[in-house]
Image (spheres, rainbow, N blue to C red):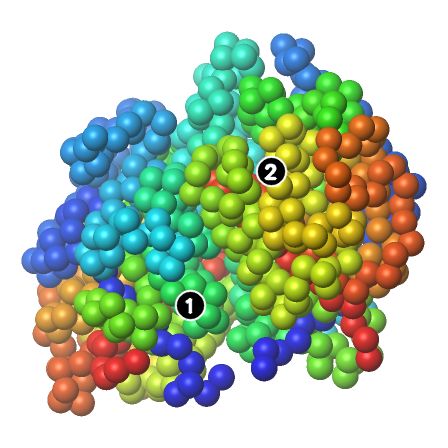
Amino acid sequence: MKSRIAVTGLGLVTPIGEGRQEVWEGLLAGRSGFAPVESFDTRGFSAHLGAEVRGFDPAPWVRRQDPAALGRASQLAIAAARQALDDAGLDPEALEPERAGVAMGTTSGEPREVERFDDKYLAGELEQVGDEFMGLYPCHMIAAHVARELGFAGDNTMIPTACAAGNYAIAHAVDVLRAGRADVMLAGGADSFSRITYTGFARLGAIAPERCQPFDRNRKGMIPGEGAAVLVLEPLERALARGARVYAELAGYGLSCDAHHMTAAHPEGDGAARAMQRALADAGAVPADVSYISAHGTGTPTNDRLETLAVKRVFGAAAKNTPMSSIKSMIGHTMGAASAIEAAVCALAVALDRIPPTMNLEEPEEDLDYVPNTARDLRVVLAMNNAYAFGGNNASVILRKHEA
Amino acid sequence: MALENRRRVVITGAGCLSCLADSPGGLHAALVAGHSGLKAIELFSTDAIGCHQAGEIRPFDAQAYLPDRNLRPIDRTSRLLLVAAGKALAASGRPLEVAERDDGEIGLVLGTTFCSLRTIAEFDRRNLQLGPSYASPLDFANSVINAAAGQAAIWFGLRGLNSTISAGAASGLAAVGYATDQIRGGRANALLAGGAEELCFESFFGHYQAGRLCGSAGNRNEEKGEVPIPFDARRNGFALAEGAALMMLEDAAAAAERGAPVLAEVLGHGSGFDPLGTPESAARAVARAIRLALEEAGLGPLDVDALSAGANGSVDADRWEAAGVAAALGARAEILPVTAVKSMLGEALGASGGLQLVALLGTLEDGVLPGILGLEQTEEGFPFPGASPNARRLPGHRGSGAVTALATTLSADGHAWAVLLGSWRGSA
């Protein structure tokens, strides 16, 4: 019998707001986080929209370290981590340090530090690059900075599996807890808005010019974003013993690899389907049990078509009756943070019995229920969170309603 | 789960590339002979940098190892990985065609710090110099930190779970620990695990500026030169290196069923993190990692026959790692044979943990542990009187000839990991 894992706290920093309340209300209202990019000059690009986190102030969150001496993804991650602990009613100082761990995912780590390096390199000013570069840049510094901030001495793992990384980090935290190596795990993802990432997606022709329209036949692409989300995970028994509010149980996960193409999904949705099947088996569930699917749903022509295909393969006749929406239509693609944010949203959907819509959906390309443009009241017993990434890395995570 | 009921994890093949040798056997022989792979860098100019030696793989002709396939879209880190992974697959006796079948699904857990920092930086610089339309989409695909793992999955048809773990010098041990969990948990039967890292200007320069390389920044000493000798009182930083080392980890029962060669068993693993950056906190992290590894194995300090330390010549981290090992193993540390292979291999970051473990496979086979090349004087309070510059034969484990060996690493940023390997005894 596998031990049960509870989700007891949620922290979010997104392009449409900070904190679970603000983000949840924004998603139900269909709020958009898109605006012309401010963090660098997009002249020379064919695209100009981004989903940046505006007005973020790390000072209230980063207390034990100098906020200015941390990369932006680390700042965002620490804000989400402290929110999540507050939300769970846990005081980090009161936890046993060696029994508290951190698992974080990312796509690019702290790319702004490389960008700074490159600016100096091209200006012939490499002598101005100091010891901060290696102290800040490596992606594992995100998990390290979170743990330093909170004094956590348990398992500390950074999983840079690109745009599915948040789900990978949550999956790893489940394993650490089930192995009895921690009492509390913070699990999530973080990425900062980046010139490198933006350039790459622009070169792939993947950035939408005006809005993000997942599953619409006229969709024109994704919109790069930034953000962070952290979930507090703990053994269910321990959570109940301390009287914690349980948003949901983390019921299972499934991982797979397409082994097909670096940037394009498998043409038959093979890896995506296997990840979903494994997650279902791990959760002891069948497709008909799933109340809601949180789609990867980037808004690119290929992702959405193959994702629909994969869901149909796994769900069969149940596919049409299973609502599936993409919040990327509102907050954009927050890269390594995306599936962590979506997992937090699944936890809220399970707890509150409402699901967020897919915005900007006017002409659905396929016949699934994409929850177009309006949030919906729905009893959510089981939510499946799907995420796909460069490198063919697929991850599905399942959250289940906790019933006492 | 009770020890007797859980799935056991064995190593059925290994492959590596390093500045010393391109095979596990060759690596063990070179380490035992006390050869150094450190030399003046030729990959890039070090003129502007006050430090010049590294563990560079030279020559590295990936095409010679991987004929008949187009390597153009594959960068240096991925090439290193492909070569080592191919060797590990072949050594494990799993023909690559098996990977194409559903029932033969193989996955990959890769430890790396940067994947390719060079690819990332060059992609960005091309955009800055020529404009976004000249930045290469091919390079962008390789700019994600899981790119090498993705390329290897495509190359070999590895459709099982595919994960990338970053923890600096501890990445490789972390990857093996992660893979062990996955197999024990029944989520995979066969996983390649280990690490890969390339040497490039950007990371070399960065480590130099951070004072982590020999004779650099904080502890520059022209007269002394570069002294990357682990645990030696004269040490003044590490020599950066590159490489790749992968092992095929399998469920013991599945391996036995197909009659696979078994090189060793992964007995346990553990980790800890130093959130404070103090000597005590760092030692606690290392001690916790070792304690968890021993607990998982159901073993105690007296069962450990040899230690492969991750020490690389760093002034603080070497001392802290030693203190952590001593705290976890107690009196056992005083008679423990110890090696630190980075005295010969340098600090290959993501590849280091894999290289430590692959080297230990040789020790498990013939009972000979390499020395710590160049070790002459240790500091007061140094806890391993058993450390020596020369290789030595282990006394053996309870007369059976079986060996239990511990690999540890404390990264520069506070990640501690421990993996316990043992000779394969008995059936699954």
Gap between marks 2 and 1 measured at Cα: 29 Å
| B7 left or right of A125 in image | left
Residue lying at 91% horizontally and 54% vertically, measured from the top left: A377
Question: Which residue, given by chain and number where applicable, does mark 1 sit on?
Answer: B183
Question: Which residue, given by chain and number where applicable, does mark 2 sit on?
Answer: A306
Label 1: how many Cα within 10 Å (few below 14, some 14–19, many 20+): many
Amino acid at dot 2:
Leu
- Secondary structure at numbered mark 1: helix
Q: Find out whether the residues at labels 2 and 1 contact each other: C-beta distance under 8 Å.
A: no
Q: Nearer the viewer, residue A365 or A78?
A: A365
Same subunit, tags 2 and 1: no
Q: How many marks?
A: 2
- Secondary structure at numbered mark 2: helix
| B108 left or right of B422 in image | right
Q: Nearer the viewer, residue B111 or A25?
A: A25
Picture coordinates of residue B298 (x, y %)? 38, 86
Which label sits on residue A284?
none
For residue B405, what is the image quadrant? Answer: bottom left
Residue lying at 56% horizontally and 34% vertically, measured from the top left: A111
| Circle 1 chain | B
Residue A391, above or below B293: above
Residue B282, above or below B196: below
Picture coordinates of residue A346 (x, y %)? 76, 55
Residue lying at 73% horizontally and 31% vertically, measured from the top left: A365
Q: Farthest residue in the bottom direction?
A: B398
Q: Nearer the viewer, residue B216 or B223?
A: B216
